Image (spheres, helix red, strand yellow):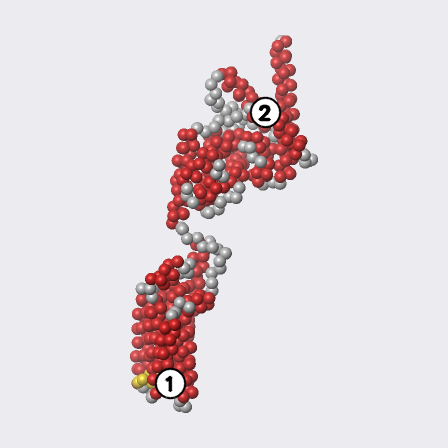
Amino acid sequence: MREPTDLELEGLEQELRLPLSRYITRSPKTEETKALIGRLQAEFNLIGSETQSFQLTFNEKIRRPSLLKQVLSQAQTYQKAFWVVSIIVFAMLTLMSGAASPFLFDDIDLFSVSVPIFLLSSFAYSYRSWNREMRMVESITPFPPAVLLLSRLMILIALNIVLGFIGSLYLKLTSQSFHLLPFLMHWLALLLFIGGLLAYLMFRLGLFAGMIVSVLAWGGWISMKEWFFTGNLSKNWVFGMEAILMLMGSLLLILAFRRLALKQVEVEGKLG
Amino acid sequence: MITDEKLVELMAKGDQAAFEAFVHRYHGPLLGYLERMLQDSEKAEDFVQETFLRLIRQLQQKKIPEQIRPWLYRVASNLCKDYWRSSSFRSEYHCGDEVPDQKDTSPTIIEIYERQETRKEVLQSLHQLSELERQIILLRFYQDLKLQEIAEVMEMPLGTVKSKLFHALKKLKSYLVKEKKFKSVESEGSYYA
């Protein structure tokens, strides 16, 4: 089929414009158009309601930062005073432990008692629900508050582990009779378990329930440990139980991460 | 004048005035196009409504068509094609090659007669064309679409549209010339009879 030139086509169009223009159809009356608008109105109103209920639109090109980036950015929200106080607390704990004996009563050391409770109290401080600026940041950030809380908990666990390790190394260097591994296991196992339990429960039962259960777990473990030692339980048994506690804590942290990742996928799916 | 694209953009934000203005703007053109395509005023009115509904649903999903006018005519054309393929059309449409009469509300009997005659003549000539050619003619002559817009409606290259339009016009011309000759012979015959 030959393609016509524009001139040929134009000529033919001009020639047929008049006869074809005789085929007229009726135009709708204004009332008919109004009736049509009336029939379409209900469907159109859905657009209005959707725009009102969904005002936040996120730029899909901006990639959601990883949890590591989130942790680093959240670390910057802590004031200098917080870091200084934390260092002072651990320095005091280390010095108090080294001054006489690292153990408070029988085999229960000061670190095991204090480090988990320091974690819980510093987490309660970092929740900062009364802080207006933090509430504002939390209300406009595209991340669910749970991500912020988990990243803060990660910061605090890491801080406790680092400062605890430094304190433990100091005790090892200053005392010949000090056994580093059992000492580390005592406080680290409980710290990880309490941290994991708090993270896990926070996603299921909420922050306050998580805090209460964690404090009870801490108290329960300290009482049980005292009972173990008075009952002359072998140190290998205690070591084994602490290893299990450590594993459980790590597992709970992983489960909290998994739940968070699933939640994020769910939210992205709804937005997409 | 506010563009179609701007009106639809406002509609997507729930603007009532833009919605009404858009329906007022396109009710007539779409109805005319669909009436010529379907030869059925009631069905045409239904399909006009359906075309607008599809646009609104598209906006509900935050998908704003880039070229509004071609998009509307493409949807309207597809509705016609689906209808022609449907069993309800086959059972309703019995008249074969015969062109159906349409109600005309013009005032005098002579005018009614003349209009119906001219309309029938053009309609018959249009029915000599293939469905595709007829659609191109309707979009070009009655909806004033640019050739590029027709290409977008039909989803075919511009060259193909030009070529099909040219051949459709040639067919129409030859048919109308034949008709004219036939009528003049017929009227001469009746004069001498």
Who is closer to the viewer here, B76 or B91? B76
Question: Furthest-right residue in view?
Answer: A2
Element type at marker 2? Answer: helix
Quarter containing the N terminus of chain A: top right
Question: Furthest-bottom residue in view?
Answer: A176
Residue B105, percent across and down? 47, 22
Q: Is residue B104 left or right of residue A239?
A: right
Residue occupying image coordinates x 42% and y 37%: B20
Whether residue A9 is visible: yes
Label 2 or label 1, whichever comes before in sequence order: 2
Q: Chain of mark 2?
A: A
Could you say which disc has been placed on residue A18 in the image?
A: 2
Mark 2 and mark 1, same subunit? yes
Residue occupying image coordinates x 30% and y 73%: A216
Please state which of the two labelled residues, at mark 2 or mark 1, is closer to the viewer: 2
Check disc 1 and report the residue beneath it.
Answer: A235
**CA–CA distance in space, label 2 to label 1:** 107 Å
Could you say which disc has been placed on residue B161 in the image?
A: none
Q: Chain of mark 1?
A: A
